[in-house]
Amino acid sequence: MIRNVAREIAMHLSFELSFTDLSVDELLEQRISGPRFETLAPEYEVYGELPGPTQRAYICRLVRGIAVHGYELDRYIEKYAKGWRFERIPLVAGAIMRLAMYEIMYMPEIPNGAAINEAVEIAKKYEDPDVVRFINGILGSFVRSEVVE
């Protein structure tokens, strides 16, 4: 499993956090398992292989970080989504942007351009082209205005 697949799985799990009563650790324990992956593999290619220890650690770091910093990340999304209330942003798009913003803010080993590019590539699988451009624009504005390099 490569990092972009791990990112996509982390996006699914962070999205799911919005709709579950499970704690982040319970969700991770239940969802990163062989039976769960076998169930999802026919529908989603990213579940074709169970993550190894490095990928599992990466997924867990992202999902836990997004859970802890979700409010902050959502405020940044709202700030740069000019003319849009956060509630109007598609939920998957929000999950994708949270993931990229978390990497940009809290994972300095990930280049900002890579975080944005990966977010756009994930978005292309789940959103229409207008939403993909919206995500790219918000993430680009966020990096230009908030990130000191």
Image: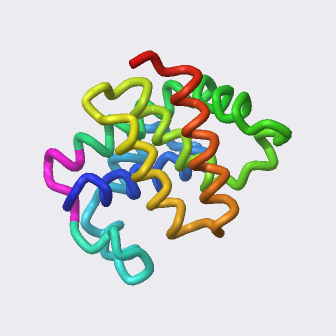
Residue 92, located in which quarter of the rendered image? bottom right
Q: Residue at x 31, y 75 (%)?
A: 38
Q: Residue at x 27, y 74 (%)?
A: 48
Q: Is residue 33 placed above or below 38 in the rendered structure?
A: above
- Please state the horizontal and vertical placement of residue 149, each as a whole percent of the image: 39, 19
Q: Residue at x 43, y 47 (%)?
A: 27
Residue 6, located in which quarter of the rendered image? bottom left
- Quadrant in which the N terminus is drawn: bottom left
Front-most of residues 127 and 42: 127
Whether the magenta-drawn stretch holds residue 51 is answered as yes
Residue span colored magenta: 50-56
Total numbered labels placed on residues in the image: 0
- Please state the horizontal and vertical placement of residue 5, each as a whole percent of the image: 31, 60
Most distant residue in the top direction: 148
Whether the magenta-drawn stretch holds residue 89 is answered as no
Front-most of residues 8 and 30: 8
62 relative position to 16: left or right: left
80 relative position to 73: left or right: right
- Please state the horizontal and vertical placement of residue 57, each as a whole percent of the image: 23, 41
- Please state the horizontal and vertical placement of residue 86, each as a whole percent of the image: 76, 40
* Colour treatment of the image: rainbow
Q: Is residue 12 placed above or below 80 in the rendered structure?
A: below
